[in-house]
Image (cartoon, grey):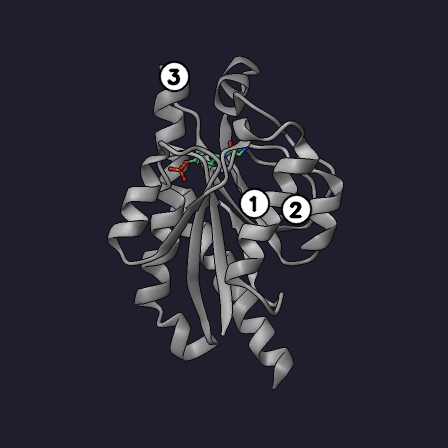
């Protein structure tokens, strides 16, 4: 089995989209892949309850309980590896709002993904929608990319574009972008799974 371990910090709507796509697309039968666990750095993340209800294993690695990024990342890696002992799964960041150390990223190199709510390389970092509106952009969007040690860099796997409309606020724009995130993230993962299966013959 190829485990998908999803990391969240909040609502988890992307996580939900991925879980639903996995069921609808029969990823287990077709690619031998399944969402094995949802891990949050925040004990109060709403997505945890949803995942638990779906019968998915959940875990909390609370960053406030660790003295350093290195210590937090070590605990996070231990939690991930528990659900992916063979180290062949995907680590899927879905609204996970912690910056990861280079050491952590290296450990999962090539199989750690993120979704970022901008058309990278524009607007890495936070407050992407406010910054896009303030810059006078006519379009915004989201990017699914492989994670490298440099924040919001790494090979782009999927992007989606939405218009910025007159009167848009960061909130209205975020909602428009989010609907597209829910399409491109499952699509990007499914393509990787299909490619991995093909490569294995
Ligand atoms: C999404 O818009 C995602 O792109 C963004 O947080 C939101 C999480 O929503 N991620 C980042 O900003 C990463 N730096 P969700 O919890 O409902 O999936």
Q: Is mark 2 within 8 Å of ligand 1?
A: no
Who's the residue at 59% across and 31% down the image?
A: 66
Q: Is residue 54 left or right of residue 59?
A: left
Residue 89 locus on image (x, y percent): 56, 64
Residue 131, given in percent of the width and then of the height, sits at: 55, 18
Q: Residue at x 43, y 25 (%)?
A: 164
Crowd band around label 2 with a 10 angstrom C-alpha radius: few (<14), some (14–19), many (20+): many
The residue tagged 3 is 169
Would the CB of label 1 be found within 8 Å of ligand 1?
yes
Q: Is residue 148 left or right of residue 99?
A: right
Which residue is disc 1 drawn over? 114
| Residue 195 disc label | none
| Spatial CA span between label 3 and label 1 | 24 Å
Residues at circles 2 and 1 in contact by the CB criterion of under 8 Å: yes
Say which of 182 and 99 sits in front: 99
The residue sitting at the bottom extreme is 201
Relative side of 6 to 68, left or right: left
Label 2: which secondary element: loop
Q: Nearer the viewer, residue 154 or 69?
A: 69
**Mark 1 residue element:** strand
């Amino acid at each position: 089995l190829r485990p998908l371990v999803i990391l969240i910090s909040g609502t988890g709507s992307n996580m939900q989209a991925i879980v639903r796509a996995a069921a609808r697309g029969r990823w287990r039968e077709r690619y031998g892949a399944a969402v094995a666990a949802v891990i949050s750095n925040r004990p109060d993340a709403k997505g945890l309850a949803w995942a638990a209800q779906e019968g998915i294993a959940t875990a909390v690695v609370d960053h406030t309980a660790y003295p350093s990024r290195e210590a937090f990342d070590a605990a996070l890696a231990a939690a991930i590896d528990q659900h992916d002992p063979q180290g062949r799964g995907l680590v899927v960041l879905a609204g996970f709002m912690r910056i990861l150390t280079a050491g952590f990223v290296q450990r999962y190199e090539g199989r750690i993904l993120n979704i970022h709510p901008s058309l990278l390389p524009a607007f890495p970092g936070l407050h992407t929608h406010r910054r896009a509106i303030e810059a006078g952009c006519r379009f915004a969007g989201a990017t699914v990319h492989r994670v490298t040690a440099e924040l919001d860099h790494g090979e782009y796997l999927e992007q989606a574009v939405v218009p910025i409309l007159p009167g848009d606020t960061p909130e209205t724009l975020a909602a428009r972008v989010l609907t597209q995130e829910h399409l491109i993230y499952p699509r990007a993962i499914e393509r990787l799974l299909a490619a991995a299966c093909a490569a294995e013959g």
